[in-house]
Amino acid sequence: MPVKVWDLPLRLFHWLLVICVIGALVTIKLGGTWMIWHGRFGLAIIGLLSFRLVWGIAGSTHARFVSFFPTPRRVIRYLRGQWEGLGHNPLGALSVFALIGLFGFQALSGLVATDDIAFSGPLTRVVSSDFSSLMSGWHRRTEELLYLLVGLHVLAIVIYRVRGHNLLGPMIHGYKKAPHPATEQANGGRWPALIIALALAGLAVWAANGSWIPAPAPAPAVPAW
């Protein structure tokens, strides 16, 4: 019997994050004026990840981090074939946390990164040039790690599909086949929690876009003579 596993906000977060990450990767390769959109995708990712962090506490059953956190005991049980569950399995959970961490680092470091040509992060004015240079270097270097983790994530989806486990379907319609007839539907993640999560995500984007930073003082006028 199919049971509800992934709530709608989580599913929307997942696919919007996919779109924004692809957009960020494509625009960084195009360069030039496309860097404006690279920055916009980065801000969107910050908003999405901020929402996910709140939803990982206040969302429905399988969206909560505590429900799938990959403890050593859970990982061992999974490797022994003793794990049963509807949400992320322990190895999938490791992938989820790794991707959230890497996406978060990329987005946050991008806020203070600069290439001195076509792009400067919105918060470069509030950090030192040395720190900006450091973060710019790490932002570029970890891009390859991002490709690696995303590639492994996609490969895992393909392997599970070959073995008869469709991971994409449930992330579209939200339902999985329950291993036991008495399995309960996911619960929680009500409107108040959603409103709070969206509000905090919006606050994070506002803080990240740098609009609160005072404009630099105008340069003194140069006498005409």
Image (cartoon, rainbow, N blue to C red):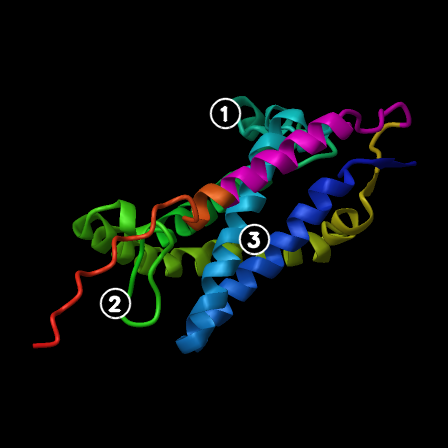
Q: Which mark is residue 147?
A: none
Query: Regarding mark 2 in the picture, which secondary structure is present there?
Result: loop
Q: Residue 83 occupies which quadrant of the picture?
A: top right
Image point (61%, 25%), residue name: 57
Give the vertical position of 130 relative to 182 (above or below): below
Q: Residues within 10 Å of mark 1 (few under 14, many from 20)?
A: few
Q: Name the residue under label 3.
A: 153
Residue at the left extreme, as displayed: 225
Q: Where is residue 198 in the image (x, y as percent from the top left)?
A: 64, 37
Q: Name the residue under label 1.
A: 72
**Going by the image, does 127 lie left or right of 225?**
right
Magenta residues span 181-205
Q: Name the residue under label 2.
A: 116
Amino acid type, residue under disc 3 in the picture:
His
Q: Residue 16 occupies which quadrant of the picture?
A: bottom right
Q: Earlier in the sequence, mark 3 or mark 1?
A: 1
**Going by the image, does 57 lie left or right of 4?**
left
Depth check, front residue: 31 or 138: 31
- The answer to whether residue 44 is visible is yes
Q: Real-space Cα distance between discs 3 and 1?
A: 21 Å
Q: Earlier in the sequence, mark 3 or mark 2?
A: 2
Q: Residue 140 occupies which quadrant of the picture?
A: bottom left
Amino acid type, residue under disc 2 in the picture:
Asp
Amino acid type, residue under disc 1 in the picture:
Pro
